[in-house]
Image (cartoon, helix red, strand yellow):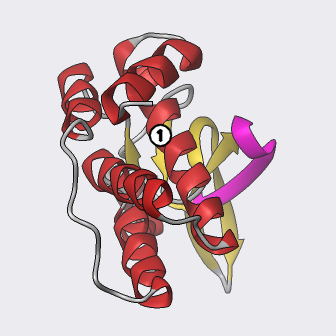
Amino acid sequence: MEEANNELQFSIGEHVVYPLQGVGVVTDIRSRTVHNREILNYVIYLDISDMTVTVPVDKVADIGIRGIVSGPEAAAAIESIKEKCEPSTLDWKQRYQANVELVQQGSIGNVAKVVQALYHRSKVKELPVQERKLYESAMRLLIDEAAFALDLTTSEVKKMVDENLGC
């Protein structure tokens, strides 16, 4: 059990990012016995979906759960969406898969790239339903994390994102 405690990256009350799910808060750290082995788990509450997940401490890196980025990093991600991006030449299924992989990687910069690409794509042609849902999810992830990082409300961050996208 002592060894598992050395692996703790997060503490109770700390906000974390769960890729594709959003910003959550570590509400507890519990030990469970599975197959006669003690496993330490984070209990994370995800407000956006009103869901609580239990994640083994040793699987956090595999899943991509990470702490909230710094304020400057969040601001840089929002700023990065200002530039107009070149439309992808991939068909929508390939484009969708590439964008899902970017979001799954979990970095705020990659999430911002997906928001930027799908926003500009939507101005050329209506997005298929799956891509529209991915766009909305990526937008929510970007806004939620940036709001925590910049200590702003989600509506203030949404306004910043919209201004940078040229909405």
Picture layout, residue 53 above or below residue 72: below
Which quarter of the rendering shows the C terminus?
A: top left
Give SS at disc 1.
strand
Residue 50 forms part of the magenta stretch: yes
Mark 1, Cα crowd under 10 Å, few <14 / some 14-19 / many 20+, is many
Picture layout, residue 7 above or below residue 36: above
Please state which amino acid type lies under the numbered disc 1.
Val
Residue 76 forms part of the magenta stretch: no
Picture layout, residue 13 above or below residue 28: above
In the picture of the structure, the residue carrying the numbered disc 1 is 16
Residue 156 x, y percent position in the rendering:
49, 12
Residue at screen point 45% across, 68% down: 63
- Residue 78, quarter of picture: top left
Residue 99 x, y percent position in the rendering:
40, 71
Residue at screen point 52% across, 32% down: 144
Residue 102 x, y percent position in the rendering:
35, 68
Magenta span covers which residues?
Answer: 47-55
